[in-house]
Amino acid sequence: MKRAVFSLSALCMTALPAAAAPLDPGHMIRPELLGRALDALKAHRGEADQTHLVVVDYARRSDQPRAYVVDLVTGSVEAFRAAHGSGSDPDHDGYLDKFSDVPGSSASPQGAYLTAEEYSGKHGRSIRLDGLDTTNLNARARAIVIHAADYAEPAFLKQWGKLGRSNGCIVFSKEDLRTFLKDVPERTLIYVGK
């Protein structure tokens, strides 16, 4: 997938606003969701990388870019398509209907995460996630990770008009995952919301 790159207005990391609604002049990221993500970054300043932020907007349909990598140094924003969990979309219409952190739910949990170590697993290169909120504390135990899969590839989207579904993981195409892994350092805060 060709990724979209946009610019944010200048952002001073030493004085993050409580809600940074006007930071995205391209209006890619919904202002209220960006504000919540920036609040989470501020709350976890001591443990989260301060150069990047990832916002996943599961209010958008899976055929649309909805995972945003924000470079807080340059102000650029990259947008990617990302699959959500089957338990969050039982009718498989491409929209996430509900979040859950219950083991065995196959649903996507919401809230703030930190990217952790990279590893090679069933789906190849993957990144473990550590949940920071009560809504996603089981992320590591549930193996909620970032990985690539065939059901997130452009060919799947072309055939079905939407991405497939994961067991709750954030899933990219192989090409997008390569870019994501290159651009997102360990301990980056990811905010998943709707």
Image (cartoon, rainbow, N blue to C red):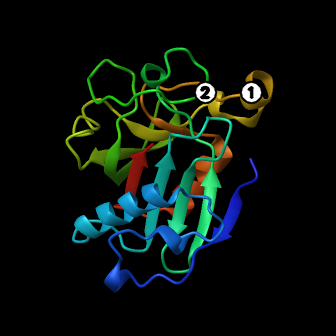
Image height of 129 relative to 26, above or below: above
Residue 13 to residue 186: above or below: below
Image point 71% across, 59% down: which residue? 4
Tell me the quadrant of the picture where the C terminus can be found: top left
User: Looking at the image, how many numbered discs can be counted on the residues?
Assistant: 2
Task: Determine the image quadrant of residue 79.
Answer: bottom right
Q: Which mark is residue 28?
A: none
x and y percent of residue 20 in the render?
43, 71
Q: Residue 178, percent across and down?
A: 60, 52
Residue placed under numbered mark 2 in the picture:
94
Between 9 and 148, the one lying in front of the other is: 9
Camera-nearest residue between 123 and 97:
97
Question: In the rendered image of this protein, does residue 83 appear above or below residue 92?
Answer: below
Q: Secondary structure at mark 1?
A: loop
| Left or right of residue 153, residue 149 in this image | left
Of the numbered discs 2 and 1, the one sitting upstream in the chain is: 2
Left or right placement of residue 32 versus residue 9 in this view: left
Q: Nearer the viewer, residue 23 or 171?
A: 23
The x and y percentages for residue 45 are 26, 71
Local SS, label 2:
loop
> In this figure, which residue is indicated by the disc labeled 1?
161
